[in-house]
Amino acid sequence: MRFDDQESALLSGLAAQIIEFVAPEPHDPAQDPLFAIVGIDPSATLPDDPALARLFPDAFTDDDDAAAEFRRFTERDLRAGKAGHASTVIASLESRSDRLDAEQVAAWLGFLNDVRLTLGTRLGISDDTQAELAALAPDDERLGAYALYDWLTYLQDSLVTLLLPR
């Protein structure tokens, strides 16, 4: 992985934003002793923010009670995992090493997936928007965000391709 200073700064900034974005709501463990012991979040609900809902979808679409129960037991760990991936990306960029170990590769793939899902949701990207994106005027203010999404897609694809057997 080799990035120039601007690319590293951009990726570090995106990783910092993901860390902030996925941070769980503060919770007082004294209010729920079970939470303090095992990390269950009694207040976890499907996020109102469409991008967060995309990152943390319901596990069960046909059973609201099961989905809520599953979320209570898993969401804090999922959020911590996503923040951990982004932190690993920042650390690997700061190290300036062009080699990643297996744990770093997994973190990069998770981070790239998370930032693409977030950005794609914000931009409304779907299979049906390809023609619209291709027709954007050169002065369209959304063009930079779409270009960023494409670059992140390229990075993710490049990393996955390197992992394929030769």
Image (tube, rainbow, N blue to C red):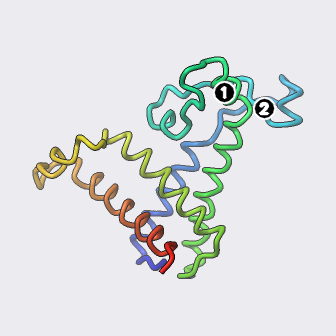
Tell whether label 2 touches label 1 (CB within 8 Å): no
Task: Name the residue rendered at 36%, 40% in the picture.
Answer: 122
Task: Name the residue rendered at 57%, 81% in the picture.
Answer: 99
Residue neighbourhood size for the residue with mark 1, other residues' Cα within 10 Å, grouped as few (<14), some (14–19), many (≥20)? some
Where in the figure is residue 50, as x and y percent of width and height? 44, 32
Q: Is residue 25 above or below residue 79?
A: above
- Amino acid on which disc 2 is placed: Ile
Give the structural element (helix, strand or loop) at label 1: loop
The residue tagged 1 is 44
Where in the figure is residue 106, as x and y percent of width and height? 60, 63
Where in the figure is residue 38, as x and y percent of width and height? 85, 37
In the displayed orientation, state which residue is furthest to the front: 166
Q: Is residue 155 above or below residue 131?
A: below
How many numbered markers are drawn?
2
The residue tagged 2 is 40
Task: Name the residue rendered at 60%, 32% in the picture.
Answer: 59
Which label was assigned to residue 115? none
Relative to 115, 22 lies left or right:
right
Where in the figure is residue 11, as x and y percent of width and height? 46, 63
Relative to 163, 151 lies left or right:
left
Relative to 121, 37 lies left or right:
right
